[in-house]
Image (cartoon, rainbow, N blue to C red):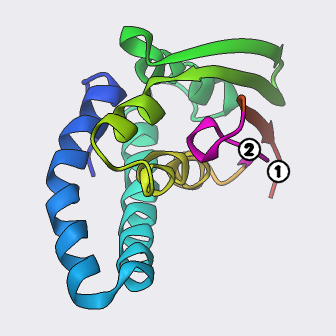
Amino acid sequence: MAKTDLPILEQRRIEANIIKPIFEEMTARLGEEAASDILRAAITRDSVAQGAAYAAGEAGENDLHGFHALLPQWKANGALEVEMLEETGNAVHYNVTRCKYAEMYKEMGLAGIGHILSCGRDGTFCTGYNPNIKLDRTQTIMQGASHCDFRYRWEET
């Protein structure tokens, strides 16, 4: 996937409208587990490619600072409410306290796969952007938690 200039929430809405009938058909033919596995693999591959496309478009280095500078595109139009905990050259930690992505998927009848369509991208996007950026996250609003705990760190490989 190429880099987009759209707010990511709008990009995900467009994608979800295309994916929904395809996922429903795969589920009908293959079962929910197989359909979810296929979707997860495709989204992962796309996410890594999208991270690489964003990195290629960077004017500076694709370090943690550059990566963190992308957050406004994910937050655009109030898509995420974020409580910043730490911002250093080696760590960016924050909690998402409201997620309109989760709300959107629920409204679209896709709450059961929203974590695949969005949350699962977060760590794999890093891999494409710069493999030294790692994400530790133990919970998401999408899967019923009170908040998402994003803990990005720089790790030399």
Q: Is residue 4 visible?
A: no
Judge left or right: residue 150 versus residue 86. Answer: left
Please name the residue that numbered disc 1 is placed on: 156
Q: Determine the residue located farthest toward the bottom in the rendered image.
A: 30
| Image vertical order of residue 85 relative to residue 37, above or below | above
Q: Nearer the viewer, residue 112 or 122?
A: 112
Position of 60 relative to 1 (above/below): above
Q: Residue at x 62, y 51 (%)?
A: 123
Q: Secondary structure at mark 2?
A: loop
- Circles 1 and 2, Cβ within 8 Å, touching? The answer is no
Magenta highlight on residue 9: no
Which one is nearer the viewer's eye here, 87 or 65?
87
Which region shows up in magenta? 134-145
| Among the two numbered marks 1 and 2 on one chain, the one whose residue lies closer to the N terminus | 2
Q: Three-letter amino acid code at disc 1? A: Glu
Residue 114 drawn at (x, y percent): 44, 49
Q: Which residue is located at x 72 percent, y 49 percent?
A: 132
Label 1, label 2: how far apart the Cα atoms are: 25 Å
The answer to whether residue 61 is visible is yes
- Quarter of the image holding residue 61? top right
> According to the image, label 2 marks what residue?
139
User: Is 144 left, or right, of 46 in this rendering?
Assistant: right
How far across and how far down the image is residue 107, in percent? 31, 35
Residue 126 position (above or below residue 82)? below
Is 136 above or below relative to 153?
Answer: below
The residue at 41%/20% (across/down) is: 73
